Image: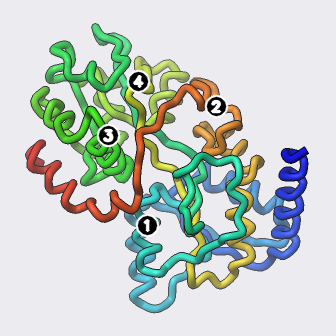
Amino acid sequence: MKTLLSAAALAFSLASAAAAADGNLVLYTSQPNADAQATVDAFTAANPGVEVEWFRDGTTKVMAKLAAEFEAGDPRPDVLLIADSVTMEGLAAEGRLMAYPEADTAGYEDGLMDPEHMWFSTKLITTGIVYNTAAPMAPTSLQDLLKPEAKGQIAMPSPLTSGAAAIHMAAITGAEGLGWDYYQGLADQGTRPTGGNGATYKAVAGGEKLYGFLVDYLAIREAAKGAPVAFVFPGEGVSAVTEPVAILSTARNPEAAKAFVDFLISREGQELAARQGYLPALGDVTPPEGFPARDQIRLLPFDAAAALKNDQADKLRFVEIFGE
């Protein structure tokens, strides 16, 4: 009965938000173009009174554009949908985000949503192990990459370039049994991080390296197309960026922005994420083909606020270890 009442309450809440939402909504996002268009199309189908104007680029460039608009005193977006929660934590600390305490986050695991409801995770993009299917060893754990078979054969993105790699660094170095000793072990294996996830995928798929750290969807999508790669969710766990959505404190249309948040974290929005090939953040939504069930994926603990606080010190230590 409780489940039925909760579902009815959610449906009423979404219907109320949709009824109240109209006018123009400005979205800044780091989603790939096709995904961003599909997201906007699905949202406007559910909210026909809202017209969405959207700008898309990588998170770093989106934030640079937004910083210039803050400086000019004229931030344009109502809502942000970008890669990582650490960036959202920075905006919240500066008072740039609007809390949305009424948002329905029931059903989501602890730690996925900001406790103050400043930002909301919309999917899980995990970083695990990719390997070339011609490699002599099929790794199952992070520790496998410290074995002699992997020496000189590891590619990984740099946290100085990739936000997902920065979060991976924070999760790994904060994990019991891994820590900075694990990164020192990778350096001792001759690993030289460079570029973003695309560079790592290219090195492993092309056979330049046999193993690497990579975001899940990139390896799983390309493996389905016949690329000679396989993705592993290691036993110790994976890190994850969660593509959070947030409302700016300067939003000109906060009701439409709330409706956009409601849509993305609703079951309909989570099923859209799965159709786009991403692991839904809502645990009981079926993952796309090629992914294991959510309860078979172990997430490494991650504290976005601590990661923001330690970001510069961690990157300096990373440079000391790997010599970038």
Which residue occupies the foreground of this view, 111 or 260?
Answer: 111
Q: How many neighbours does mark 1 have within 10 angstroms: few (below 14), some (14-19), or many (20 or more)?
A: many
Residue 235 bears which disc, if any? 4
Residue 134 placed where, x, y %?
33, 10
Amino acid carrying label 1: it is Glu
- Mark 2 and mark 1 in contact (Cβ < 8 Å)? no
Q: Residue drawn 10% across and 30% down?
A: 188
Chain-order first, disc 2 or disc 4: 4
Q: Secondary structure at mark 4?
A: loop
Amino acid carrying label 2: it is Pro
Amino acid carrying label 3: it is Ala
Is residue 32 visible in the rendered image? The answer is no
The residue at which mark 1 appears reads as 89
Q: Secondary structure at mark 1?
A: helix
Chain-order first, disc 1 or disc 3: 1
Q: Residue drawn 71% across and 52% down?
A: 106
Q: How many neighbours does mark 4 have within 10 angstroms: few (below 14), some (14-19), or many (20 or more)?
A: some
